[in-house]
Amino acid sequence: MHERFVISNVKLITGEAIDIIIANGIIVEVVEAGYGLGSHIVDYSGSYVSSGWIDMHVHAFPDFDPYGDEIDEIGVKQGVTTIVDAGSCGADRIGELVTRSEKSDTRVFAFLNISTIGLARTDELSDLEWIDNAKTIQAVQDFGHFIVGLKARISSSVVGEHGLVPLHIARELAKQTSLPLMVHIGSGPPNIKDVIPLLEQKDIVTHYLNGKSNNLFDEEGKPLRVLVNAIERGVHLDVGHGSASFSFKVAEFAKQHHIDPHTISTDIYRRNRLNGPVYSMSQTLTKFLYLGYSLQEVIATVTTRAAEWLDKPELGRIQVGDVANLTIFTVNDEQTVLVDSDGIQRTSDKRIEAKGVVVNGQFIECEIWA
């Protein structure tokens, strides 16, 4: 990319039209639209710009099946400049993920699976011998710049006969490493009413809008008391759409009762990227526009709120002097069929579409909407 270039005629979520001038990868000026000067101008009239999108729940270790994919395929090519791998790797292979991340355009962080084998198997907590506290603590010490939390998948197919035992182990590991937990919820046992009380401030409950029988809303659509209590003590709600964990019906219950997502994430990996129902971050965000959230609310979940959780506020802003970390996108007035994890279709009259990103001093065009 040219040494000094301009992202021209873009608008902030507020509607303010601007040019962003970038030199040597740094934002050097933000001026009124049409007034930016540089050796190369990229004109994106009619498009929005935000700080780079952050996806708090992906699976970016390509060796694992089904939960794996190439980093940039679910990162910059989708308009996402930062991904957080949600426990693909445990202590055995987290170093490999770090090495792969260093060769990618997308910025990567990770939750470390408390099972040393990670998602080499999908029942990784069914044998307690696969949980090695010493190895986990050592991995956190070795890769502290990369690991942002610990991951425990607490659903019946993962924990087997052990119920809440892996979560209690995770809680102790969190205390020893001073890291928060991301806890996957799904089919019981264990019962969701026993899981949620074990989460503390800054811990993340992911898949909170799943439509399984063991979910966080009662038959009338009201939030369970354990969920309300968790929100009050600072537990973070993450969408984690995935192949089986986002229900329009449950999401509508949540919206009705103001149980809103702190972060919208995809839980994307190769299969649900290619075959749906996730496809992309753009489609996932569009579902929340359909649900009635404002564009400002939707974009905040993948910019300022995610950056705040990561304790990296610079990733959630556009500011002179900062490294250029931008996502350019449009909001198109056209009917779009959306599908949830239960196969339920809804038709939106708008859709968000990522157009490009600025990372590492370069502009990268996004792939076409899937």
Image (tube, grey):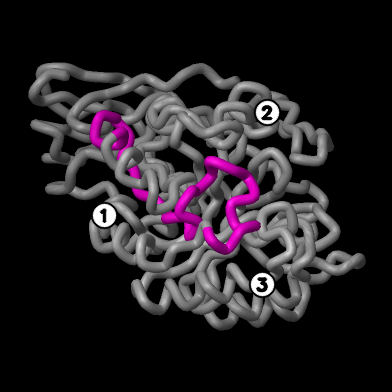
- Boundaries of the magenta span: 100-129
Q: Residues within 10 Å of mark 3 (few under 14, many from 20)?
A: some
Given residues 194 and 347, the one toward you in this image is 194
**Front-most of residues 66 and 218:** 66
* CB-based contact (under 8 Å), mark 1 and mark 2: no
Residue 276 - label? 2
**Residue type beneath disc 3:** Leu
**Disc 1 marks which amino acid?**
Phe
Whether residue 230 is visible here, answered yes or no, is: yes
Which secondary structure, mark 3? loop
Question: Which callout, 1 or 2, points to the residue nearer the camera?
Answer: 1
Location of the N terminus (image quadrant) = top left
Lower position in the chain sequence, tag 2 or tag 3:
3
Circle 2: residue type: Gly
Q: CA distance from mark 1 to mark 3?
A: 27 Å
- The residue lying at 46 percent from left, 72 percent from top is 202
Q: Name above or below for residue 127 compared with residue 122.
A: below
Q: What residue would you read off at disc 1?
A: 143
Report whether 41 appears left or right of 260: left
Q: Under tag 2, what secondary structure?
A: loop
> Helix, strand, or loop for circle 1?
loop
Which residue occupies the foreground of this view, 291 or 241?
Answer: 241
